[in-house]
Amino acid sequence: MLSVKSLMTAVAVTALLMPASSYAGGTVEVLHWWTSGGEAKAVGTLKEAFEKKGGTWIDSPIAGGGGDAAMTALRARVMAGNPPAAVQLKGPGIQEWADQGSLNDVEDVAKAENWDSVLPPSLASIMKYKDKYVAAPVNIHRVDWMWVNPTVLAKVGAEVPTTWEEFNAVADKLKAAGITPLAHGGQPWQDATVFETIVLSQGADFYRKALVELDQDALSGETMVKVFDQLRKLRGYVDPGFSGRDWNLATAMVMNGEAAFQIMGDWAKGEFLAAGKVPGKDFLCAPTPGNGYIFNADSFAFFKVSGEDQVEGQKVLASLIMSPEFQETFNLAKGSIPARTDVGLDKFDSCALKSHEDLTASVKNNAFVPSMAHEMAIPRTVRGEFLDVVTNFFNSDMSSADAAKALGEAVKRAQ
Ligand code: GAL
C-alpha cells in the first residue's frame, strides 16, 4: 500500500538547477488513453517536445476515459510479445508489470538528473521497482472536485454547496426548476469516481480503511451504508441519458448550461480550458464535501523493448517528461499540477493553486489519499469488484444495506 506520510518531507526539497538533457533521438510507440479535447492537447505537447529532440513518436491512443480499454489493449500487446515502448500506467499497476519482468528501467537517466531530489518520496516509490525507476510521473490530478456552472446556479439563487445536505438542497431546487443538477456519465469508472468522493466525505481515516486497507468492518458497516444513501440521492439528480455517456460529454453539459454540476477529477478542467473557458468566471471548481485530497498521478512506464533506437527513445522520453519546462507546459493543458515539487506555479490558475494548497494541507493532516477508481490504491482485480458493486447499485434499486454487504463479500472474494 502507498505510504503517504513520507510526502511530508517533500515540501522541504530545494529547487535544483537542471543540466540541459543530453538525451536526443530514438523512437517510441506511446500507448495512452488521452483522446478528449483537453487530453489530446496535453499529450500533443509531449509529442511535439519529443519530436523537437529529433525523436520519432508513434501514437497509439486507445479511446475510453479512465483507461480500462487501454489496459485491455496493453495486455493483448504484451501477450503477443510486442509491447509498446511507453505506456500510460500508474499506481500498483506499475509494480504488477515490473513483477512480471515486463519493464525496462531508466535508472541511469533518473540518477543523472537526480529525480529523487525533486519528487515527493511517496510518488517516487510508486515509480520504482527494486530501487530503480521504471516509470516517470507527469502530474498530480485531484479527483474530489465539483465543476460548476455559476450562471445555472444563479438561476435558482444558490451558492456552491459545502456539505452533501446543502448539495441535495440545491439539487432539489434545480430539479424543481427543470434543470439537470448533475451531469454524469454512467460508466463504471465514473460511478466509482463519484462514489469515492462520498467515501472521503466520511473522513480520510474511513477512506483509507475502506478503499486502501480493505477493512471488512469499514466496507460493510453503517458508514458505508450512509455513503450508498448519498450515492442513491445523486442517482436521482442525473438526466435520463446518463447511461454510457463519456465523461467529457458530461463536462460539456456543464459548459453549455445543460447541467449545474459534474463531479470529476481536474482533467475536466482541461476540457473547459480547451474550449476557451475561464475559471472563476465561466466555470467554478470547488472540492466535494469533506476535508481531504484524493490524488491520481499519471505516469509513463517503459516496457521491455529491444533495439538501440527504442531504448534510446525511452531515455529521451523519460528525461523529457521530468524536465521542469515540460511539467509546466503539459500540466497547464491537462488541468493537473506538476509532479515535480520545484516547478513554480505562477502561470497556473486558481483551481490549480487551490489543488496545491489543499494537497499541502492534506499531507499535514494525514488526509492525502490515493484514488481507488483511478488505480492508485489497490490492485486492478480488487478495484474491479468495487466497480461492479457500485455500478450495479447505481443502475438498480438495490438497497444501501445490501450494497454495503455485497461490497464486503466481493472484496473478500477477490483477495
Ligand atoms: C484518469 C487519468 C486522467 C484522465 C482520466 C479520464 O484515469 O488519470 O489523466 O485522462 O482518466 O480519461
Image: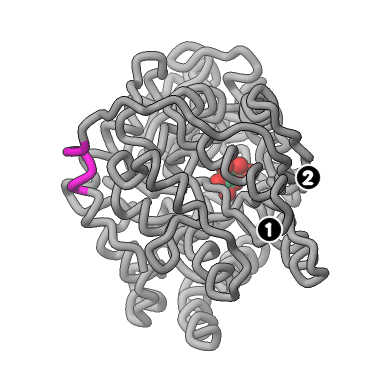
The percent position of residue 364, horizontal first and vertical second, equals 17, 46
Given residues 225 and 325, the one toward you in this image is: 325
**Residue 138 point in image, percent of width and height:** 49, 39
Instruction: Give the image quarter of residue 117.
Output: top left
Q: Residue at x 32, y 65 (%)?
A: 208
Give the answer, above or below, for where 137 lies relative to 19: below
Q: Are marks 1 and 2 in contact (CB under 8 Å)?
A: no
> Which amino acid, mark 2?
Ser
Give the residue number, with chain letter if any, for mark 2.
Answer: 60
Quarter for ligand 1? top right
Q: How many marks?
A: 2
Residue 132, above or below 140: below
Residue 232 appears in the rendering: no
In magenta stretch: residue 48: no
Q: Distance from label 1 to label 2 (Cα)?
A: 15 Å
Q: Which mark is residue 68?
A: 1
What residue is drawn where x is 46% and y is 38%? 139
| Residue 318 visible to the viewer | yes
Query: Where 79 falls versus 61 (above or below)?
Result: below
**Residue found at the very far right of the displayed protein:** 80
Single out the mark in the foreground, 1 or 2.
2
Report the side of 27 relative to 146 (left or right): right
Residue stretch rendered in magenta on the structure: 8-13
